[in-house]
Image (cartoon, rainbow, N blue to C red):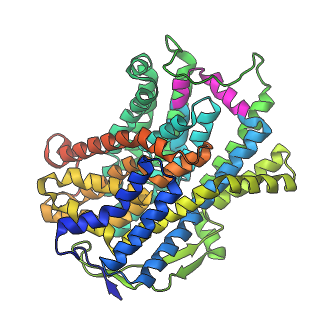
Amino acid sequence: MWQQTYNPLQSQALSTLVAALPLVVMMAMIFLRRKAHHAALTALTLAVGIATLVFGFPFPMAAASALYGAAFGFLPIGWLILNMIFLYKLTEKSGLFNVVQESITGITADKRLQLLLVAFCFGAFFEGAAGFGAPVAVTSAMLIGLGFPAIQAAGLALLANTAPVAFGSLGTPIVALQGVTGLPMMDLSAMVGRQLPFFSMLVPFWLVWMYAGFGAVRELFPAIFIAGISFAVPQFLVANYHGPWLVDIVASLVSIAAVTLFLKVWKPASQQEKSNTEQPKTTNQKPPTKNYYQAWEPWIILTLTVFLWGIPQVKGFLDAWTAVKIEVPYLHKAVERVPPVVLKPTLENAVFTLNWLSTAGTGILLAALFAGRRMGYSVRGLWQEYKATFHLVKLSLLTISTILALGMVLRYAGLDAALGLAFAQTGWWYPLFGTILGWLGVMITGSDTSANVLFGSLQRITAEQLGLSAVLMAAANSSGGVMGKMVNIQSIVVAGAATGNEGQESATLRYVFWHSIALALLMGLLVMLQAYIPPFSGMVLGK
């Protein structure tokens, strides 16, 4: 057994700076236009060196944690992305995706409104049903098809995929947060449901401003307001009175319906926009209704499949037959976390679950194969397309696995906790910096669920020491974390793979970086208000 140490250099500031070095180097390399997989491999190598030489992490444990992370990077995350891109490529090559584009333009020809409908409304549904990169992959591909430039499509899809994230994958981040904090599930769900709706109102406005400027926001105000309010109100109600499981599903369906119906009776004064993008090719002749159904059928099949695969009872049934739990050698129950990161010394689990059948990526693969046959592909044709898709995304899969390997090394070596403890020293300002800690957690891991597992316990302990609501700060970890989703390299790589824009991760990161910082700071200010200032403080549970 090896016990973590969080201040190996006997200087909290210096230890924190050294712990942050792998992340700083990776982000700097990407900003300097280095390839994402080169940056991730460099950061991983540096992290292993710092973990072993500075923090005293035994090398066999470091190697095991890296392999554990790499395996998790492929299953479930890389597996999901591979199969999602496979389905998209099938619809694109068959020509049906063009019909999907035309059906969307049938609702509105204004690309600013198409952005709202696709990236915000549809994206939230896929976040609620599947998560793990699915919404970014689907919506960025759709935006490309609607005529958005690749980098812009990726960045806008990343920005839109924020407000729903804390309740993604049928509420998995909140379930994980409850598991590590021991706080009541409904209190955590309700508290996040009293933070994110403000941003569910804000993000659609921010999205249109980011794409087309303030003039477009003024012109499209009614439609943007409808998109936000029709998502925010159900999000608040379901989170507070039902729980975390169906928040995104219900809110996204209400928002899709509300925006679609509103656009049937309201049109903007002008459809001009500040963009040099080309309009998608359309014909004057309306495609037959059958073609519309055929075009949407693969996505309907996908939606039903990921929803079915996301039901806990279905996952449990499939796992009972096929899942294999593998205790990672040299790592499982061999690393001990100690106070003040946890309440009492705790041995870390390291169990890789080989749930190849119940993972969402397998459901997507089955949906793609079934839809492909419905589209007229032969078995040989499907195999050829799958090989071509793997070739297309192989570097993205390598990058994702490497980043997850980095995240696991940081976690088991205690470098993540060293960073977290630095934030915990901020005293009265902790509500702001605790929120930023959630942002940092998602930036490292790419997952709000993982960030909650990393820092949820620390948030509760620190809040109780400072006399703050533990429910407030645990919820802030999840709510602040969603803003880190758009600057996580894993998410950026997913967007690049979906848009055929591999190798341009630096441009996408620069496009979204300051937006992510600004939104995270705004969330931190909201948590500060809820911690100290009436009437916002009246919203807080668990005082």
Q: Position of residue 18 (x, y in %)?
A: 28, 66
Residue at 57 percent of width and 40 percent of height: 140
Quadrant position of residue 77? bottom right
Asked if residue 316 shows in the view, the reply is yes
Viewer-proximal residue among 442 and 29 = 29
Q: Position of residue 396 (x, y in %)?
A: 58, 55
Looking at the image, residue 413 lies above or below residue 490:
below
Region rendered in magenta = 98-115
Magenta segment main secondary structure: helix
Residue at 48 percent of width and 51 percent of height: 34
Left or right of residue 215, residue 318 in this image: right
Quadrant position of residue 196? top left
Is 129 a magenta residue?
no
Q: Position of residue 205 (x, y in %)?
A: 40, 29
Asked if residue 311 shows in the view, the reply is no
User: Could you tell me how many numbered marks the image carries?
Assistant: 0
* Residue farthest bottom in this picture: 1
